[in-house]
Image (cartoon, rainbow, N blue to C red):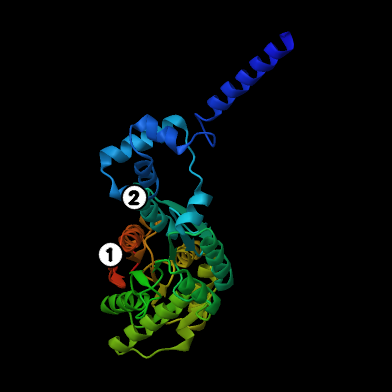
């Protein structure tokens, strides 16, 4: 009798433990959320997967219940059932490069408000690594992809086409995007800066970029520089064009090498801000006055530009807006809208003391 009593007590205790588990984490069920929020199971499902279909009040009520109970949706099962998750994959060339921070923030801010999550990956500027990451994201049934590159491997293109997910490209403005593109034209921006330098009286304008064979953006910037020289009536000079590795040191060496072999160079346009800053630091170390001895211009508006002496002239690009508009275009497509395939957000030239 005592033994049976202890068994019943043990069973009851186990049931109580089980009940407690179901009020939090993986043990909590969707029906618990529905009961707590006073809504149907369908409403809870929509709040988690299609929040835009609910009123703000209802969505908030459900999400408050989710947080209170600690319900964790089974995203794997949901992905298998719907063939789409509430996750968007974004691939950038380098998470160490602060240039991409604003774009990622703009994307995440918009997706968060829509109930979607952002997964970020670093391709290391490698098409093959981008291909592998695209495959990994698609295997997780992401709702969409945002890719900084606009050149992709044949296998990556094949995987994307078969998946049918919407794709936004952001690194350049190709005439025929893979799906949708939200960006600016690297060629037009480089041409505009070259014309700007010419308008300020510079005649021997050098150009320094990353390797154009491996980087489409670098190729487009070189093309824009060359078009700018042509518009100015200036002859292209191979001695005034250099391709270098990334980094401050590369910018410093490029400036010294160009001045050494072409002493009459009076301005250098660096198709990358880190290169331009490296050149400026080296000019200061050598006692070369900027812009008296050499004028310097960059391609992005890094925060450091406003604190260097002199401040650097550069192209200002709408990176935060690119992130926002990319996410908005993706959401519109997911909701059945017909978005424009090309969105050109343009650029600005910021004239400062270095030119």
Relative image position of residue 105 (x, y in whole percent):
39, 52
Q: Is residue 29 above or below residue 230?
A: above
Relative image position of residue 196 (x, y in whole percent):
28, 75
Q: Is residue 320 above or below residue 197?
A: above
**Residue 17 visible in the displayed image:** yes
Q: Which residue is mark 2?
A: 114
Give the SS element for disc 1. Answer: loop
Task: Say if mark 1 contacts mark 2, CB within 8 Å.
Answer: no
**Residue at coordinates 55% horizontally, 76% vertically from top-left?**
155
- Dot in front, 1 or 2: 1
Q: Dot 1: within a 10 Å radius of its alpha carbon, few (fewer than 14), some, or many (20 or more) residues?
A: few
Q: Dot 2: within a 10 Å radius of its alpha carbon, few (fewer than 14), some, or many (20 or more) residues?
A: some
- Gap in Å between the C-alphas at discs 1 and 2? 15 Å
**Residue at coordinates 57% horizontally, 21% vertically from top-left?**
16
Q: Nearer the viewer, residue 250 or 20?
A: 20
Q: Is residue 293 left or right of residue 285?
A: left
Residue at the limit of the structure toward the front, as seen here: 1
**Residue at coordinates 44% horizontally, 32% vertically from top-left?**
32
Q: Nearer the viewer, residue 333 or 120?
A: 333
**Residue at coordinates 35% horizontally, 37% vertically from top-left?**
62
Q: Which residue is mark 1?
A: 337
Give the SS element for disc 2. Answer: loop
Question: Going from the N terminus, do you reach mark 1 or mark 2 first?
Answer: 2
**Residue 307 visible in the displayed image:** no
Q: Nearer the viewer, residue 89 or 283?
A: 89
Give the position of the C terminus as an image quadrant: bottom left
Give the position of the N terminus as an image quadrant: top right
Q: Is residue 318 left or right of residue 146?
A: left
Q: Quadrant of residue 122?
A: bottom right
């Amino acid at each position: 009798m005592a033994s049976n009593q202890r068994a019943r007590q043990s069973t009851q205790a186990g049931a109580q433990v089980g009940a407690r588990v179901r009020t939090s984490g993986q043990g909590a069920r969707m029906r618990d959320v529905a009961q707590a929020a006073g809504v149907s199971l369908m409403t809870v499902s929509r709040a988690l997967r299609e929040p835009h279909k609910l009123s703000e009040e209802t969505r908030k009520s459900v999400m408050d219940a989710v947080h209170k109970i600690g319900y964790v949706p089974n995203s794997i099962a949901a992905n298998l059932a719907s063939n789409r998750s509430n996750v968007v994959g974004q691939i950038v060339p380098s998470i160490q490069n602060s240039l991409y921070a604003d774009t990622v923030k703009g994307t995440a801010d918009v997706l968060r408000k829509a109930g979607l999550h952002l997964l970020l990956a670093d391709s290391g500027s490698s098409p093959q690594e981008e291909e592998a990451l695209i495959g990994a994201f698609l295997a997780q049934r992401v709702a969409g992809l945002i890719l900084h590159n606009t050149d992709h491997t044949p296998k990556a293109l094949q995987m994307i086409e078969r998946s049918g997910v919407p794709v936004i490209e952001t690194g350049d403005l190709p005439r025929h995007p893979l799906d949708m593109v939200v960006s600016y034209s690297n060629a037009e921006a480089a041409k505009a800066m070259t014309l700007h330098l010419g308008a300020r009286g510079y005649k021997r304008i050098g150009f320094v970029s990353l390797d154009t064979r491996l980087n489409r953006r670098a190729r487009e910037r070189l093309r824009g520089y060359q078009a700018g020289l042509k518009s100015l009536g200036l002859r292209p000079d191979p001695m005034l064009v250099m391709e270098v590795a990334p980094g401050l040191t590369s910018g410093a060496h490029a400036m010294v090498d160009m001045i050494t072999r072409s002493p009459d160079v009076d301005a250098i346009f660096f198709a990358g801000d880190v290169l331009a800053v490296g050149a400026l630091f080296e000019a200061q170390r050598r006692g070369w006055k900027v812009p008296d001895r050499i004028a310097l211009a960059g391609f992005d508006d890094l925060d450091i530009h406003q604190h260097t002496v002199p401040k650097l002239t550069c192209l200002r690009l709408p990176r935060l807006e690119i992130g926002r508009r990319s996410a908005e275009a993706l959401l519109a497509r997911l909701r059945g809208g017909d978005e424009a395939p090309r969105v050109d957000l343009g650029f600005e030239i910021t004239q400062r003391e270095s030119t």
